[in-house]
């Protein structure tokens, strides 16, 4: 009798785990199908970035990549041009624009990384905002960069003077206070009505304090729509992977499953790759190059369903530059800082 009971129990366990495995495989399959639906977008940069650490970038191509990886405290609305929520979902400002209270979302996670230990990731907290601003100031001093708008924060000069080439001081900044994990106060020494706009700049990316302490200027851990790891940073190609835990501004579209970025190709090579379907878009093209390519491939730009679309933003008109992209890409736009927001674009196969 006991033996029969054991056998029944064993069969039930086998059946239970079989069901679990089946469910897991279905979920995984759906997840993979979902990723394939999002598609892979590819573009090329003329040269490989010297850095994608936001506080050190000097090229638009570097900022283009790091802005996919990182998020800022606030952002700029593409329609109104006004500051709008990002990591901070709300804020209060006093009457003379010298005191800002930020309320942080409690569901924004950093990309997974070994720096977080067994938990692999964690929620963005006020201490990360403080740490990021400290490392920004330290970077400015170490690499002789201007501090810019942060000089208006009370106590920044004292902290700046305490910075050495190798060490970020373990002291606070008088004008940056946090009462809990999700509330941050920044007090300025003067009225600064455009302070929020500056906080939205790509160079003011928010990174985890653990990663900044361990990796320094090699930090690539962010909380943006895409993530990257060292093994995906090859000599002539990098791959950004969709951050499935991304929760910021996800109402419109979900972007692509991967972004492939090629480096060190000539314009002629890029155009050849576009023609062959190995690139999805090329930006920063001069009028002479565009004219020659369009004339040679005029049929691919014509009709109701052309292969390619020629695009020029208002900002590009000033420098006479153009974008050519696969016509299946929809929702492609440049934000207020000239960055393509890949998380808002998508493939439309129709």
Image (cartoon, helix red, strand yellow):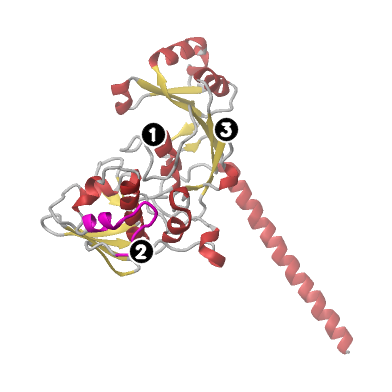
- What residue do we see at 26% from left, 62% from top? 173
Nearer the N terminus, badge 3 or badge 2?
Answer: 2
Q: Which mark is residue 139?
A: none
Nearer the N terminus, badge 1 or badge 3?
Answer: 1
Residue lying farthest to the left in this orientation: 96
Q: Nearer the viewer, residue 216 or 192?
A: 216
Helix, strand or loop at disc 3?
loop
Residues drawn in magenta: 156-171
- What residue do we see at 82% from left, 75% from top? 11
On screen, 15 above or below 194? below
On screen, 307 above or below 72? above
Q: Is residue 145 left or right of residue 61?
A: left
Q: Tell me, yes or no, if residue 350 can be seen here.
A: no
Q: Looking at the rendering, which quadrant does residue 312 occupy?
A: top left
- What residue do we see at 42% from left, 48% from top? 70
Residue placed under numbered mark 2 in the picture: 127
Where's residue 166, x and y in %? 39, 54
Where's residue 129, x and y in %? 34, 58
Whether the magenta-drawn stretch holds residue 165 is answered as: yes
User: Looking at the rendering, in which quadrant would you find the N terminus?
Assistant: bottom right
Where's residue 167, x and y in %? 38, 57
Q: Is residue 266 left or right of residue 90?
A: right
Residue placed under numbered mark 1 in the picture: 59
Where's residue 49, x and y in %? 47, 36
On screen, 16 above or below 163? below
Q: Which mark is residue 236?
A: 3
Q: Tell me, yes or no, if residue 180 can be seen here.
A: yes
Distance (Cα) linking label 3 and label 2: 36 Å
């Amino acid at each position: 009798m006991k033996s029969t009971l054991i056998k029944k129990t064993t069969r039930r366990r086998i059946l239970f785990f079989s069901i679990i495995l089946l469910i897991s495989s279905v979920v995984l399959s759906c997840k993979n199908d979902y990723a394939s639906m999002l598609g892979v977008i590819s573009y090329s940069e003329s040269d490989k970035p010297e850095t994608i650490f936001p506080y050190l970038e000097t090229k638009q191509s570097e900022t283009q990549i790091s802005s996919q990886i990182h998020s800022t405290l606030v952002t700029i609305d593409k329609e109104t041009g006004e500051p709008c929520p990002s990591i901070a979902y709300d804020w209060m400002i006093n009457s003379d624009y010298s005191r800002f209270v930020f309320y942080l979302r409690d569901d924004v996670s950093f990309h997974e990384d070994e720096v977080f230990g067994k938990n692999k990731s964690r929620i963005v907290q006020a201490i990360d905002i403080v740490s990021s601003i400290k490392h920004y100031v330290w970077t400015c001093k170490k690499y002789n960069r201007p501090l810019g708008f942060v000089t208006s924060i009370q106590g920044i000069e004292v902290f700046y003077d305490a910075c050495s080439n190798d060490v970020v001081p373990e002291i606070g900044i008088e004008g940056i206070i946090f009462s809990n994990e999700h509330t941050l106060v920044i007090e300025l020494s003067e009225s600064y009505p455009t302070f929020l706009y500056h906080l939205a700049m790509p160079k003011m990316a928010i990174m985890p304090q653990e990663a900044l302490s361990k990796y320094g200027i090699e930090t690539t851990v962010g909380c943006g729509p895409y993530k990257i790891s060292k093994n995906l940073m090859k000599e002539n190609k990098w791959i950004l992977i969709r951050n499935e835990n991304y929760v910021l501004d996800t109402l419109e579209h979900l972007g692509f499953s991967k972004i492939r970025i090629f480096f060190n190709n000539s314009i002629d090579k890029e155009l050849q790759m576009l023609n062959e379907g190995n690139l999805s878009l090329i930006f920063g093209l001069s009028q002479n190059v565009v004219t020659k390519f369009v004339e040679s491939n005029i049929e691919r730009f014509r009709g109701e369903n052309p292969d390619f679309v020629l695009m020029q933003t208002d900002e590009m008109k000033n420098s006479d530059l153009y974008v050519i992209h696969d016509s299946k890409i929809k929702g492609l736009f440049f934000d207020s800082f000239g960055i393509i927001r890949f998380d808002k674009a998508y493939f439309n196969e129709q």
